[in-house]
Image (tube, rainbow, N blue to C red):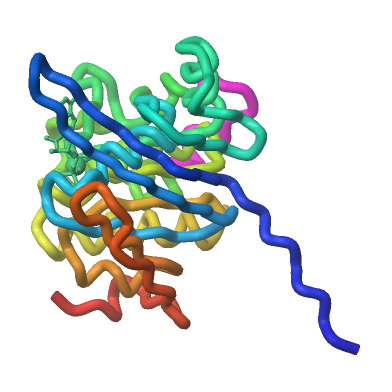
Amino acid sequence: MAAVPEPVDTVFHARGLAKVYRTGEVEVHALREVDLDIARGEFIVLLGPSGSGKSTLLNILGGLDVPSAGEVMFCDHNLSTASESELTAYRRDHVGFVFQFYNLIPSLTVRENVALVTDIVENPMPADEAIDRVGLTPRRDHFPAQLSGGEQQRVAIARAIVKRPEVLLCDEPTGALDYQTGKLVLDVIARINNEIGTTAIIITHNAAIAGMADRVIYLGDGRIQRIEVNARKLKPSELSW
Ligand SMILES: Nc1ncnc2c1ncn2[C@@H]1O[C@H](COP(=O)(O)OP(=O)(O)O)[C@@H](O)[C@H]1O
Ligand SMILES: [Mg+2]
């Protein structure tokens, strides 16, 4: 008997997404006619030149920005018609963000930075578990200034995952790091995707990272230029750059 294919559990569904930024007389078309579906548990790498619309797309998926036209759904949440307070609740309950700069609170220890989040969300993982998942248990009583850039970024990842988000959105998480340290950080994100099944979308300038993804989405001039599917995901240690 033929196997019945598993139904795909789509977390993001976007159709005809467009974003126009208007500054006085000037209009910038940051996204044009973007159609995209992302399945639960996927590991997506977003590539493209500076200004191609990567951050705009990620910000719309994360409820930090809204499209000018088109529809975007997260499961049954319509993000294109959501109010400010609905978007705030969506971000709090479902999304972990990691940015290029770590935005840690300098006067709080690693554990305290992570525990801040566990106070405001339902059903978080224990702060120590999140810290363990990023390999920083020995450093949990240190302050950010006592840590390297890569370690600080791993604290930011622990802070993002402690609420057990369904999606982890990372905008150039290795942008301020050297290659070796960047690999470590990417390895942490890949392990979280693997072990917890968190859907992960990562923006990067580094095309070598593409091998880690289930799918690589190339943006250019606000459009999806092409999508590549990797038959086998590589571990960061197998990547060379
Ligand atoms: N808040 C904004 N106001 C005006 N223009 C913006 C704004 N954000 C982004 N843009 C413009 O939209 C385009 C896409 O930007 P962005 O999504 O940040 O690209 P990327 O992340 O790929 O570098 C760029 O031309 C950028 O200058
Ligand atoms: Mg960007």
Quadrant holding the C terminus: bottom left
Side of 217 where 55 appears, left or right: left
Relative to residue 56, is residue 215 depicted above or below?
A: below
* Front-most of residues 217 and 105: 217
Bounds of the magenta segment = 118-130
| Residue at far bottom of view | 1
The residue drawn where x is 18% and y is 21% is 22
Picture coordinates of residue 17 (x, y %)?
41, 40
Picture coordinates of residue 240 (x, y %)?
18, 79
Question: In the rendered structure, does residue 129 fall within the stretch colored magenta?
Answer: yes
Side of 126 where 149 appears, left or right: left
The residue drawn where x is 12% and y is 18% is 23
Residue 229 occupies which quadrant of the picture?
Answer: bottom left
Side of 234 where 208 appears, left or right: left
The count of marks equals 0
* Front-most of residues 205 and 176: 205
The residue drawn where x is 38% and y is 33% is 60
Q: From where the camera sits, is residue 18 visible?
A: yes
Quadrant holding the N terminus: bottom right
